[in-house]
Amino acid sequence: MDYKALAQQTAQEILGYYQDTSGWKVVKNSKKITVSSKASKKFHGNLYRVEAMIPESTSKLSDFLFKPENRVTWDKSLKMYNMVLKIDLDTFLCHTITESFAMGSISPRDFINLVSVKHYEGNMDVISSTSVDFPAYPPSSSYIRGYNHACGYICLPVQENPAYSKLVMFVQTEMRGKLAPSIIETTMPSNLVSFMINVKDGIKTQKIPSRRGYHHNGHSSFLKKK
C-alpha cells in the first residue's frame, strides 16, 4: 500500500470537509465547544465537526495532537495508543484501543490508523487519520475492530490573537459490532465535547517544543497548498 499517497488523499478530504459549509446541523453547544453533524458519504452514520478555540500557538497545538508519546496521558477516551510503523517524520501507523463509553453500553474498540501531518500556507496544519489494514496487527477476539473513515484536525492561528488557535476536528467512526445507531448518535456529541475539554486541559500541563522550525528548513513532506 502507498501510505504516503493515501495520507495525502486523506488530508485533502479533511480540507474538503473544512471548506464545506452546507448541510451542517448543530447537535451540541457546550463550554464554548460546538458540535455539528451531517450524514457521512462514507458509511451509514454521521460525519461530525467539532470547533473550539485553544489557548496555544498553532505549531505547538499540532505537535501536541500529532505526537503519540503522551496521548494516553491526556486523552481519557483511550487506554492505548502505540506507533506500530514509522513511515517518515510526518507519517506513521498507530494501534489504538478505546475505553468503553456511554456508561459501558459501547465496549472498547481497537483501530489501526494511518496518521499524517501536513503544513499549508497561512500557518495551517492538517492532521489526518484513516483506518487501514495492517497484517502485522490483525483483528483479535479481545476487541471489536472499528474503522475510522477520513478523520482529522485543522489547526490554524486566530488572526486577531496568534497566541490562540482555532481547532476544527472531523470524526466519522464506524464502530461496527451490534450497536444501534441511535446509541452512537445520542452519545457521540457529548464524547466529542469531552475530548475537546481534554485537549484544553492537557495542553496546559504539557510543554511541547515546536517542530515547525525543522520543517521550514526543507523537510519535503510538508506540502504547500497551491
Image (cartoon, grey):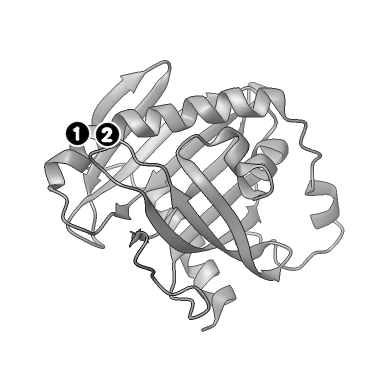
Q: Is residue 218 left or right of residue 88?
A: right
Q: Quadrant of the C terminus?
A: bottom right
- For residue 186, the mark is 1
- Viewer-nearest residue: 100 or 11: 100
Q: Earlier in the sequence, mark 1 or mark 2?
A: 2
Mark 2 residue element: loop
* Callout 1 crowding tier (Cα within 10 Å): few <14, some 14–19, many ≥20: few
For badge 1, the amino acid type reads Thr
Q: Quick check: can you spot residue 162?
A: no
For badge 2, the amino acid type reads Ala
Residue 110 on image: x %, y %: 41, 58
Q: Quadrant of residue 99?
A: top left
Residue 12 on image: x %, y %: 47, 62
Q: Is residue 158 above or below residue 11?
A: above
Residue 149 on image: x %, y %: 36, 60
Q: Is residue 73 left or right of residue 189?
A: right
Q: Is residue 164 above or below residue 18?
A: above
Q: Is residue 124 left or right of residue 26?
A: right
Residue plotted at (59% across, 74% down): 4
Query: Which circle, 1 or 2, is nearer the viewer?
Result: 2
Q: Report the residue that reaches farthest toward the bottom.
A: 1
Q: Which residue is mark 2?
A: 102
Q: Quick check: can you spot residue 140?
A: yes
Q: Is residue 77 above or below residue 132?
A: above
Mark 1 residue element: helix
* Callout 2 crowding tier (Cα within 10 Å): few <14, some 14–19, many ≥20: some
Residue plotted at (50% across, 44% down): 79
